[in-house]
């Protein structure tokens, strides 16, 4: 079973993906981590890489191809990424969202300081800009609206939930799914 987790920045994609993979004893992949690595390789921040991506498709090509390849060649993994559901259409697709203030607080105190937010207001502003950039790129290159909930098998508002509660909701939904491995 392949599980793709998409959602807004700060909604818990990375944290929940790691915890879910551990719980299921699956491998975990993170498109965000790969994109940060690509950005560093080019001397850019993730925000700068995304902005550049609005003009140059190469910034998305490597992560997109990795997702396609994983979906064709591997099984039993969890991957978090904005377009993972699109590149791995046979996956169980999850969308996480939360209110802007909660997401800004989460990313501002996150261990990944590479985004370099100077304040909570700065984090909020950059989250909004990042989402606009993501939506623009995916619409431009794939004619894809990542915010259309019809793409997803499960949608969770993580604003007031603990990580444990979120993982439990996902596991319960997976158990009801026809693709969940029966023991």
Image (cartoon, rainbow, N blue to C red):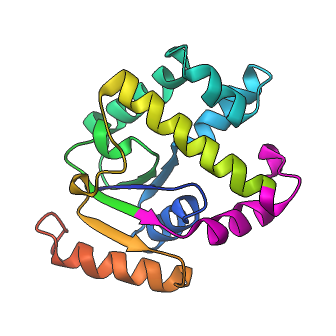
Q: Is residue 20 left or right of residue 175?
A: right
Q: Is residue 171 above or below residue 132?
A: below
The residue closer to the viewer here, 161 or 79, is 161
Magenta segment includes 82: no
Residue at the location (44% across, 65% down)? 96
Residue at the location (46% across, 28% down)? 137
Residue at the location (19% across, 68% down)? 180
Quarter of the image with the C terminus is bottom left
Q: For residue 150, which quarter of the picture?
A: bottom left
Observer able to see residue 15: yes
Judged from this view, the residue extending furthest toward the right is 118
In percent of width and height, residue 131 lies at 54, 45
Q: Is residue 140 above or below residue 4?
A: above
The residue closer to the viewer here, 14 or 98, is 98
In percent of width and height, residue 93 lies at 29, 57
In percent of width and height, residue 63 lies at 48, 30
Residues drawn in magenta:
96-121
Magenta segment includes 108: yes
Judged from this view, the residue extending furthest toward the left is 178
Q: Is residue 107 left or right of residue 171?
A: right
Q: Is residue 181 above or below residue 68?
A: below
Q: For residue 87, which quarter of the picture?
A: top left
Residue at the location (63% across, 26% down)? 51
The residue closer to the viewer here, 55 or 3, is 55
């Amino acid at each position: 079973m392949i599980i793709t987790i998409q959602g807004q920045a700060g909604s818990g994609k990375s944290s929940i993906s790691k915890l879910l993979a551990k719980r299921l004893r699956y491998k975990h992949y993170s498109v965000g981590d790969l994109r940060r690595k690509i950005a560093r390789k080019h001397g850019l921040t993730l925000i700068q890489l995304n902005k550049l991506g609005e003009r140059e498709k190469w910034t998305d090509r490597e992560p997109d191809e990795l997702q396609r390849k994983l979906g064709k060649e591997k099984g039993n993994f969890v991957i978090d990424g904005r377009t993972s559901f699109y590149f791995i259409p046979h996956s169980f697709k999850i969308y996480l969202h939360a209110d802007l203030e909660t997401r800004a607080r989460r990313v501002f105190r996150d261990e990944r300081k590479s985004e370099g937010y100077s304040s909570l207001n700065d984090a909020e502003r950059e989250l909004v800009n990042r989402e606009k950039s993501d939506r623009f790129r995916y619409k431009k290159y794939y004619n894809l609206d990542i915010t259309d909930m019809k793409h997803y098998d499960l949608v969770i508002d993580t604003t007031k939930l603990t990580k444990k509660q979120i993982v439990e909701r996902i596991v319960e939904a997976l158990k009801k799914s026809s693709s969940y491995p029966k023991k």
